[in-house]
Amino acid sequence: MKNNERDENRKNQQPENNNAGQSAGSENRPEQEENKISGEEAGRQLDNMSIELEPGEGKKHKGPIDGKSSAEKAHEEKIDKEGRSERAAVRAKKVRKKNMPPSALQGEGETIVNKPVDEDEHLIRQAFADHDWNEIKSSNSWAIFKVMSEFVEGFEKLAKIGPCVSIFGSARTKNDHPYYKMAEEIAAKLVRHGYGVITGGGPGIMEAGNKGAYEAGGKSVGLNIILPFEQFDNPYIDADKLITFDHFFVRKVMFVKYAQGFIVMPGGFGTMDELFEALTLIQTKKIGRFPIVLVGSQYWSGLMGWIRDVMLKEEKNVNEEDLDLVNIVDTASEAVKVIDDFYSRYLLSPNF
């Protein structure tokens, strides 16, 4: 009997206890959710914590604590060290820039009022500009391919042109000048004697040489170059023998490699460059002793006199026989005769 009463009392108390437990659980749940949110927020705060390294070094962010391997930690330390070195270099550059005079700041990209930057200054600054390795590597690679393409085009187009004579001279000579008429006459005579004509492909003396060869029915080759002034191809060049270069040194190789004689009319720095290129290669026996003819004794007498009196006699920088490498003439017939006399000892054949 007593046992039955205890069982009933136990049954009556269970719902109350259950209700009490549910009430207590519901009361504690918001506190647990609050604690859970606070924990997530704390995790984010840990992720975003930072520590100071050195004054001015910036901040280093801590990563989450996730048990990284020693290799991962070493990799992160290496990256951080490189970052510090780069930042130090930037600070040092800023200090140098601060101590520079205003005139030197132009190379750092600063603009000086009322002092425009011309093309010469741009090229000079570009030569002194700092370049990273990737920039240097890519720039040099493309330059190499460009030079190679110019050599390939030149070799392919000029390989079978046959015996030719290069005519050098000024691009500024007008078509009514006596030297223009003489260059035209020389080219025509060369064609009639079995030679082709190579010029720089531009105006002035170059145009006269191509015109004489073209109108005489001979081979007229033009080795043009891209310049900011003066230079453009003339209309007297054979369509399949016009080559346009970006680099002077490639162009000069073609002048010398495929010519078996040189006629040098009055000209400026470019003409002198071409003349002394041919003289140097012959003197050093890099090419055969092909004839070099200077046209216009009055024009060339001063230069040759200086070479003889100063370069040879006073300074002894050349040998006396080096002066025999050039011939000075005053007429078209004399110029062509020098070429003919030289080649009378040889059997002409295509130069490839």
Image: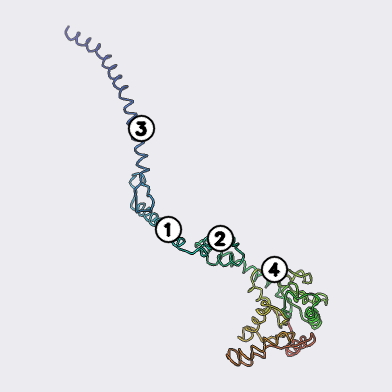
- Amino acid at the residue labelled 2: Ile
Q: CA distance from mark 4 to mark 1?
A: 43 Å
Q: Residues within 10 Å of mark 2 (few under 14, many from 20)?
A: few
* x, y percent for residue 157: 71, 71
In the rendered image, the residue lying farthest to the front is 114
Q: Is residue 79 above or below residue 275?
A: above
Percent of width and height locating residue 208: 78, 76
Distance CA(mark 3)–CA(mark 1): 43 Å
Q: What's the residue at 33%, 52% (across, down)?
A: 70
Return the residue at label 4.
229
Which quarter shows the C terminus? bottom right
Q: Is residue 32 above or below residue 124?
A: above
Q: Residue at x 36, y 32 (%)?
A: 37
Q: Residue at x 79, y 72 (%)?
A: 236
Q: CA distance from mark 2 to mark 4?
A: 28 Å
**Marks 1 and 2, Cα distance to the nearest angstrom?**
23 Å
Q: Which residue is mark 2?
A: 112
